[in-house]
Amino acid sequence: MKKKIGIIEWAMKYRQIIILFVSLLVLFGVYSLVVMPKQEFPVFTIRQGLVVGVYPGATSEEIEEQLTKPLEEFIFSFKDVKKAKTISQSRDGMVFIMVELNDDVKNKEEFWAKFKLRLSEFKASLPSGVLAVIAKDDFGDTSSILLTLESNDKSYKELEEYLKDLKGKLRTIESVSNLREAGLQREQISIYIDQDKLALYAINNTTLAANLFSQGFTTVSGSIKNPKYIAPIHIKSTYNCEYDVAEQVVYSDPMGNNIKLKDIARIVREYPDGNNYITNNGKNCILLSMEMREGHNIVQMGKDVNTVLKEFEKTLPDDVVLYKITDQSQVVGESVSTFLKELLIAILAVILVVILLMPLRVASVAASTIPITIFISLGIFFAFGFELNTVTLAALIATLGMIVDNSIVIIDCYMEKLDKGEDRWHASIHSAKEFFPSIFSATLAISITFFPFLITTSGTIKDFLVSFPWAITIILAVSLLVALLLIPYMQFFFIKTGFKGNSLEFKANEKAKRKNFLDYIQKYYDVLIEKCFKNPKKVIIIGVISVILGAIMMFGVLPIRILPYAQRNQFAVEIYLPKGSSLDQTGQIA
């Protein structure tokens, strides 16, 4: 009857298949590192939204009674809204309501689509003075790259033409989406009325306003009351230039004399004062924001965008500067580079540490499992749709030291068996079989340790961390398989002798034994462990005190944060001024 062989012995016997399979997986992992989706943070659901109601002329008390309370009742009629976390703030003319959804809401787009539809219907039941009620929920849309176009000499209209050209080029990049501009100032035709001329022609403000409005003119306030009134009047598209506006008749007397707008006012094309603007390096500018389509590689997107920008900059005049404010692709690229450096350092550290305890060949075999495991894990990540982001990189870095543990245990057992005179082939098989239950239990225990994250967290934090325990499990499982299927043959091929060299020679000449660093450690450990067994009560007391002190240090002294501070060469400053402060005051402080 043919003897049945185990999986480890099969892997040794058919090593060519294992080596080929591992080589292909490593190459696929290298390919995955280049092409797999990358971004700074994982995709997570922002379950917050903002509802704003505008009621011009109403006091904060009227807002509270006539707008806030009806809106709150309407919002709380949705079962997906978390009432305890929904906050409203009423003030003169406006109400803000921060709406938070329950943690179990997966499809927020569906909720907000229904909410906005019913909100538009609900507005009809509010007082007629309520100007608008809107809901905003796109807080999760983050910009990948921010650019500015700035110039001291060009007008906003000229800069806008350059911006349109740039947007057209960027749209050809498949990974780029949601191109949005900010800081644009639209030209307007402003009419500055001369009150003396109005009085000369005996035209009052009410008559003037009525004649203007009847021809399609509209103002921001809708009325003219102040004798020193200076305000922009927005013109419908039928008026294309200042001449068309100037020729409008504002008054006709019974004698047939017509008074045109140019007779009583100064008409100019200009930019409004506005309620916001953007500056960069002290210059007025317009800003372009772009986002990345989900599932793409942000590092590759950054390269594609940079290629377009280099070509575009060649077409710009000298007085127009294209400036990059933020570039998330650069941050992610640096994170990947940092990880690869950490990987190299880990390999060198393992070789250095193991050399102190074992021969160089042993250290090399153990260290080789690090890149093999990492690249195979990256290939699995890519196959299962994992992104390379802060969380998965953290899992990879956290496991760098664990990856070699399984292999070192098996190699250590193999070398001890060689010292006992066992042949290399059987020693290699038996060392893996003997320690399989132990390393499997250890791998399982470490992996299970991280899965409570999925139970103890909820909402955005859970979305953020959901891939972490799975990434840890995949990496450690790959490490286990490499130790069981690949390391047995690698140690058989590269490691010829045990710790004591040739065991037959060692038995023949006991004096030939050489002390190494491990022997000295073992010597002092034996002394220490013997003392511990002689004084069990002291050992237990010291252990309990150490645990208590450690807990005090961890929870009472060390600062605790779920996520570390972002390592960026930039920061944000928010300035709040008293209500009614002008834009100029804000600009002076900023």
Image: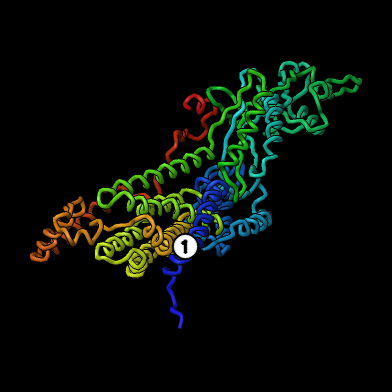
Label 1 packing within 10 angstroms: few (<14), some (14-19), many (20+): some
Give amino acid for label 1. Arg
Image position of 451 (left or right of 545): right
Q: Residue 47 at what x, y percent from top left?
A: 53, 55
Q: Secondary structure at mark 1?
A: helix
In the displayed structure, 188 sits above or below 66; it is above
Relative to 84, 366 lies left or right: left
Residue 289 percent coordinates (x, y): 60, 37
The foreground one among 312 and 586 is 312
Query: Which quadrant does the N terminus fall into?
Result: bottom left
Up/down of 356 relative to 448, above or below = above
Residue 462 screen position, x and y as percent: 46, 58
With respect to residue 491, does 234 lie above or below? above
Q: Is residue 61 visible?
A: no
The answer to which of 221 and 165 lies nearer the viewer is 165
Residue at 62% in and 34% down: 288
Residue drawn 69% across the image and 22% down it: 270
Q: Which residue is mark 1?
A: 15
